[in-house]
Amino acid sequence: MKNALIYFLTTSFMLTSVNVGYAQSNDPEPAKPRTIVTTDGEIDDVDSFIRFLLYANEFDIQGLIYSSSMWHYKGDGKGTPFISEMEMTKNMYGERTSLRWPGVTWMQDLIDEYEQVHPNLVLHDPDFPTPDYLRSLIRVGNIDFEGEMEQNTAGSNFIKEKLLDENMQPLYLQAWGGTNTIARALKSIEETYQTTSEWDEIYKRICDKAIIYSISEQDATYRKYIGVNWPDIRFYYNSNQFWCFAYPWKQAVPEPWHVYLEGAFMGKNIINDHGPLLKKYYSYGDGQKQEGDEENIHGDASKLENAQWGSFGQYDFISEGDSPAFLHLIDVGLGNLENPHFGGWGGRLVQSAEYRNRWEDGDKASDYNPYSKAMDKTYPQTRWVKTLQLDFAARADWCIKDYKNANHAPIVSLNHSPVLSAAPGQKVRLMGQATDPDGDKLIYQWWQYQEAGTYSGQVAIKNANKVKSSFTMPNDIKKGETIHVILEVSDDRELSMTRYQRVIVEAL
C-alpha cells in the first residue's frame, strides 16, 4: 500500500482513484492504535487476555483496568444487598452481596507468566512491551457492584487522565465487562468542566478521541448515562457476532471448523508445551479452577458430557467472547479500523439509522453463511475463526521457538491504488504482491466481500488464485455503488498465517 498510485488503461476507459473513506496508498505508516482494556475477569476474559498479550506488539496499550459487570462484582464489604438492573441476571441471581468475583490480581499473575516468555517474544518483534510497563498500567476501577459509577476510583481517574491528555490519536476503550468505569471517568470530566468556559472544547476533544468497543451490554451505564450525555462518542456494539468465539461456539461455528477449537488442535498447538503463559489458558477438562467463581466448573474432567453448551473433550476451547474488541484493532490489511462496516477480524458493524455515532451488529450486519446457506448475524465474525486459530497457534510458537524455526505473517501490498472507479461493463484489473519473512511459498486468493460493498450482486473474478486477477463491472451496477474485493495471502505452512489487502471499486 506504499506504492505510488497507478492507473490501468482498459479498452475504452481509465480506472481512476477516488475517495470513498479508505486510506490512500501514499499515507504515512499509521501509529499503532491506542487502547485501554476494562475487564470483569471472567474466565473468558482471562483467555482473551492471554491472546491479547500474544498480540501486544500490535497495540499502544495505555491501560489495563479491573471493572465489574452484571456477571461479576466484588461487593462493598459491608454486606450491602444488590439486585441486578439487567433482567437476565436479576432473574438468575436475585439479591446478592457479591457475585462470582475473581479478584484484582489475575492480570498481574498472567503478566508474571508473560515475563517468562517475553525474552523469546522479542526475538520475533522487539515491539512487545516489557512486563514492567504492562504492570504500570494496571488500575482497579469501579468493582463494588454492577453498574456502580458514583465513586471516583484509581481506574476511572486513570481513564480520565488519558482522555484529557494532549494526544489526539483515537483512544479505543474496550469494555470486556460493563462500561461503568468508563462512565465514571466521563462523569468526572463532566462534573469538573461542564460549568466552565472550557466545556464545549473539552466535550469535543473527548468525543473526537474516544471510541468505545463494547461486548454486549453488561450493565446499564451506556444506556443510562454515556449514550445520553455523550452522544457524540463513537460506540461500537457487538451483541451477536462474538457468540461464535464464546461459550456456544459449537452452535455458531460451521462443523468443519470445529477442529480448530477442539482439544487435539488446542492442546498440541497452543496450550501444552508452549510455555507458562499459555498453560494458564482455561480449557475444558484441564483441571483449572478460577478462584472466586463457583460457576467455573469447566476444568472438571468429570463434567464434560452434556455440559451447558454441549459435550466437550479435554482442552476444547471454552470462550474468548471479549477478543473481538482487540481483534478489531490488529492491522492485517483489511482497512477496518476506522471503517467498522468494512468487516475484519473483529467482525463487521453497521452505522445505526437512529444514532449516527453508534455502529452495531444484528440483522443489518449479517453476512451470508455458505455452510447454512442463509444470512447469519454471527458470520461476519465466524468467517475468520479458522484463520484466527491458525494465527494464534503460530504465535504460540513464538513463546518457545527462535525466529528461524517459527512462522511469521506474509507482507502483502497492492501494485495500484486500493480505491478505484470504473464504469459498468469495464474490465477491472487487479494486481497484488507479497513477500514472506520466512521464504515460504505463498497462496493467493481474491474474493468479493459482497456484504461490505453497496452493490448487492456478485462478480466473477478471473484467475482468483493468481497475483494478477480481474473482473468485469456488472451492467446493472448504479453510479456510486461499491464492490469490495479482498486479496488474501497465506503462507504454505501447517500453522499458516494470513494477511490481506482490500480493493474498493466505485461505479462511475
Image (spheres, rainbow, N blue to C red):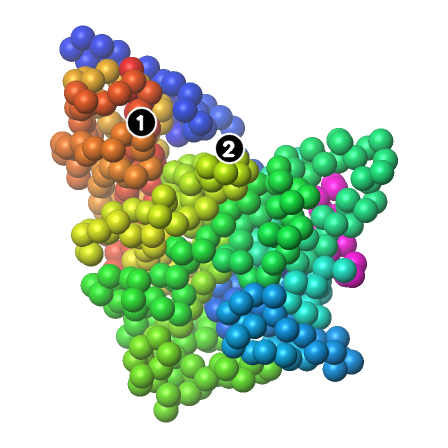
The answer to whether 142 appears left or right of 179 in the picture is right
Judging from the image, what secondary structure is the residue with disc 1 in?
strand
Of tags 2 and 1, which is closer to the observer?
A: 1
The answer to whether 295 appears left or right of 69 in the picture is left
Residue 229 visible in the shown view? yes
Query: Which residue type carries mark 1?
Result: Thr
Residue 116 visible in the shown view? no
- Name the residue beneath numbered marker 2: 29
Q: What are the residue bounds of the magenta stretch?
A: 151-166
Q: CA distance from mark 2 to mark 1?
A: 25 Å
Q: Residue at x 20, y 30 (%)?
A: 468
Please tell me in which quadrant of the rendered image residue 305 appears: bottom left
x then y, percent, for residue 8 = 25, 16
Question: Residue 156 colored magenta?
Answer: yes
- Most common secondary structure along the magenta stretch: helix
Q: Nearer the viewer, residue 122 or 94?
A: 94
Q: Residue at x 60, y 52 (%)?
A: 223
Q: Residue at x 46, y 53 (%)?
A: 238
- Name the residue beneath numbered marker 1: 482
